[in-house]
Amino acid sequence: MDFIAIIIALGVVGFSLFGLFTLIKWIIKKSKEGYKMSSDIEDKSNNIDDKASINMNNKITIRFIIIGVIALFMLIPLGSVSSVVDERNGLYQNVLHGIAKQWGSPQVLVGPALVLPIVEKYIKEETIYLKDNETKKVYKDIFKNKNIIILPQSLDEDITLAEHYRHRSIYKSLVYQANIKIKGKFILPDISKLSENLHEIKYDKAFVVMGLSDTKAINQVSNLTFDNSNQPFEPAPKIRLSGINSGFHSSVNIKKASKEYPFHFDFSTKGSSSIRFSAFGETSDISIRSSWRHPSFQGDILPSERNITNSGFSAKWIIPSLARSFPQYWINEDRSYQLDTLLTGVDLYEPVFLYSLVERSIKYGSLFIILTFLTFLIFELTQKTKLHFVQYALIGLSLGMFFLGLLSLSEHISFLKAYIIASAITITSISIYTWFNSRLLKQSITIFTLLVALYIILYSLLQLEDYALLMGTGLLLAILFVLMWITRNLRVEE
């Protein structure tokens, strides 16, 4: 699709430059005719001297300088429009933040993990001072409660995203509802190898913890099926783990004789913009699907499989435990690991961002003003009509108003419709204004054609985001070559 878009854009730019070159060629032809006519008159007249010629050149130079200063001053309204864009963009971001705060923030899933409490026994030696400076050694038993964190031996996550828009005033925010199915199995390690001072394993106090960044967005959570028993989830993680600041947990029933514990549970949550998930299993198999057509895969690991079509996308990650920076199990009080360091996921990318498009179009505003002013100056050199400096300023302001009109219209209708309406108003107003000044239909049609070509090129640059710099550079080089061709015969009067 990018290749086809580039071919179309090159065709449009080529056609526009061909029209522009034809226009310049016609202007040069008229200029030569005017020059020939003036030469004949000069040959017949004996009243025009070198001093008058120099004065005429000085007037043209001064006029170029004044019009150039006017063009520079036109950057002030362009900067004002850019400030308005920033202000509206800030308001839009505040609305997005407000909607996300109420609906659900970008979600981060960390877990699940099995927490197995243990008791360690330490013998502490104390010295007791008796009478007559005698001492006695006393040994006390000290018990410490600790928690063993056990990660799944296998972990399968199946995530389905249902996206839609939430509206507030004139703004809309892309949000989603995630239906998540998680299953896997835990294998208990040899606890005695983990703890040299092991005294007791509290199997009846074990629980499974699941981390979720924005728990207030949870719609529903099923019971945890753990080794053929069902237990409801309770709020909060119950234990402090680095990387799991919020979430939910469920008590489980562990039998000493069993070593393998399969589990599964489902839950539904809301969110916005993006979703991330951790790779907690010794082997993590994570799949995600959605009807959104513009995914942007982000995080530490890209999907091993992905499929993007007009009906949506699907992706799959297969992540081994070797990619993690933390082990399969450890004693939480002895050593802490940041559990959210290995996150991967997807952003629901919106390819056409209104304010970035308007801001990018403003960057070409000064180029539009300069090209339009140069066109009028060329007409002044070849025709008998001249524009007043005030008229130049008004034309420049009209070009600047295009961007303000584009911004205000695109907040209510699609960007393409807003662009067509705003450009049509600007092109028509300048063309009619030119006709009232000169009463020359050809000049007005030429200005109209030039502006149409410029706005077509601008829209092509805005749509080709990845190739905008290349196309813009090519356009500037083409304009520079045209200007060099036009001014190739200029001479300094001595």
Image: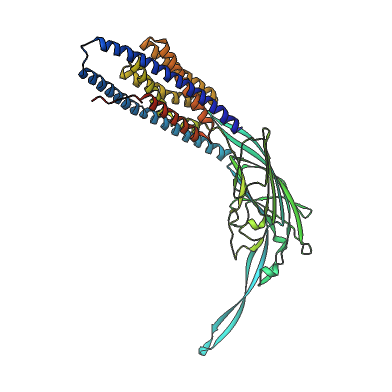
- Quarter assignment of residue 21: top left
Pick the front one: 436 or 492: 492
How many numbered markers are drawn?
0
How are the colours assigned in the image? rainbow
Residue 315 at what x, y percent from top left? 68, 43
Pick the front one: 105 or 56: 56
> Is 480 located above or below residue 40 in the figure?
below
For residue 411, say whether it is visible: no
Q: Which residue is pictured at 51% across the width and 30% down the height?
A: 462
Name, please, the residue furthest toward the front: 43
For residue 344, say whether it is visible: yes
* Horizontal side, residue 315 vs residue 40: left or right: right
Pick the front one: 24 or 47: 47
Residue 167 at what x, y percent from top left? 57, 31
Quarter of the N terminus within the rendering: top right
> Is 202 located above or below residue 387 in the figure?
below
Q: Which residue is pictured at 39% across the width and 21% down the height?
A: 375
Quarter of the C terminus within the rendering: top left
Pick the front one: 477 or 323: 477
Q: Which residue is pictured at 67% across the width and 70% down the height?
A: 198
> Is 283 located above or below residue 19 in the figure?
below
Residue 229 at what x, y percent from top left? 78, 53
> Is 25 located above or below residue 273 in the figure?
above
Residue 314 at what x, y percent from top left? 68, 40
- Quarter assignment of residue 389: top left
